Amino acid sequence: MPQEERFDVLVLGSGEGGKFLAWHMAKSGHRSAVVERKLIGGSCPNTNCLPSKNEIWSAKVADLVRHADRFGMVTGSAAVDMKKVLARKRDMVDGLIAMHLDLYKSSGANLIMGTGRFIAPKTLEVSLNDGGTRVLTGDRVVLNLGTRATIPDIPGLAAAKPLTNVEALELDRLPDHLVVLGGGYVGLELAQAYRRFGSRVCIVETGPQLAAREDPDIAAAILEMMRDEGIEVYLDAKVLGVDGRSGESISLQMHTPTGDQTIEGSDILVATGRTPNTEGLGLDLAGVKLDARGCVAVNDRLETSAPGVFAIGDCAGSPQFTHVSFDDFRIIRANLTGGGRTKHGRLIPYCMFTDPPLAHVGLSEGDAQRQGIAVRVAKLPIVAVLRSRTMSETRGFMKALVEADGDRILGFTMIGAEAGEVMAVVQTAMSAGMSYTGLRDAIIAHPTMAEGLVPLFSNMPVH
């Protein structure tokens, strides 16, 4: 066995939180190493967040070109070249990988490419990608394992070799008819994008609405948006089986409220959730326990059952967003240097990058009802925000929740142009403890989408 190499901080997986922790600790004079099997920088810059938004923007351009006459543009024939769409995305990813390598070099953190497995507490055996083996130990060990797309146990589905988000973003061809299994954020984003590229698309969702975590009025707006794009949507659908092979031809059998149906397609994309990458790593030998979901069990300080071992990001059961993994890094950084930061009470925003996008922070109406919190609710149609008329992007609405017996903002949701940027304004106000009247009475530049916050909060019922 190779001689053990000791590090002050040893991170398994190079996703958002882990890489930032390694860079920070290395710059602070601590010998740090990251063990990464394949994706330098993790899934966000390589296969998930940024690549998907890159191709979604190409789809937005395709849609603008297709409807250019609305804006006074006269165009000739136009077509989507998926090879160029893919090349643009890959160019971006290559640039991001180069940026990450520069950051490893400048920080002094070691990047070790290989597959790591625990053979003892705080001890990894790494099978190097270029051959050979190293044994690494860490005074502090951080699990940054990530998740992968879940393939449901449906007869014939695995044999059909379905696309996940990873493979869907590597296509250099246009599916003739894409069947999307799952009506969550990944499924909705990619369904709309491929429809705009020119594919026929249908969405099969097992639940009663799209975007299951959203309030019914938000889900209804998303359903209308998808159908207006020409996407077929099946709700309350139980998939009975799949035949064929994705990329050639597939047949999906399902039971719906109107009876049994069969969908014939060319490709099938599975977007039904994520599974933590915690299997086969020897975590039991490291003394690390898992929870009922297969995630690493952690406390509010992101400490595992093993002393000196932390978990970060998706694998720790944190909400599956890159910005949450980054905040996990800040929690562990603080606690490694004598702080007492925890994940308790975090205000976590999220966006879905459909067109128009969805953005949310804080409580939804459903959350408030389930928690027994009395709220006041105000809504504003996006068409009432004059900036939307200048862009001919008037679909959607804003919704705000304020405590029933006070002026504290409890939640905000928007489906509409630039929703993420507007949501950040409300999140800032919430983080600062600002009364909703502060936004109601603010002077916000005209014409902007954020300007809609003034009439939105002016619509708030008086308590």
Image: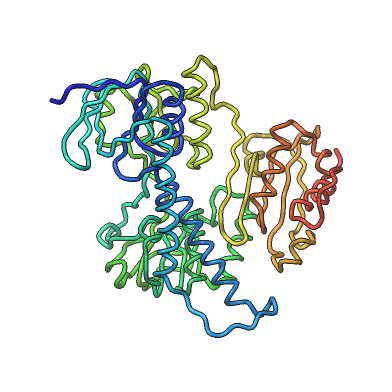
Query: Where's residue 167, x and y in %?
Result: 35, 59
- Reply above or below: 274 against 347: below
Q: Residue at x 71, y 42 (%)?
A: 426
Query: Where's residue 189, x and y in %?
Result: 51, 59
Q: Residue placed farthest to the left in the image?
A: 1
In the image shown, does 101 or 51 lie closer to the viewer?
101
Q: Residue at x 26, y 23 (%)?
A: 123
The quarter in which the N terminus is drawn is top left
The quarter of the picture where residue 269 lies is bottom left
- Reply above or below: 115 against 160: above
Q: Relative to residue 72, is residue 320 drawn left or right?
A: left
Query: Where's residue 236, x and y in %?
Result: 48, 59
Q: Residue at x 17, y 22 (%)?
A: 3
The quarter of the picture where residue 163 lies is bottom left
Query: Where's residue 34, x and y in %?
Result: 34, 32
Q: Residue at x 48, y 24 (%)?
A: 332
Q: Relative to residue 285, is residue 214 drawn left or right?
A: right
- Reply above or below: 201 against 38: below
The quarter in which the C terminus is drawn is top right
In the image shown, does 10 or 171 lie closer to the viewer?
10
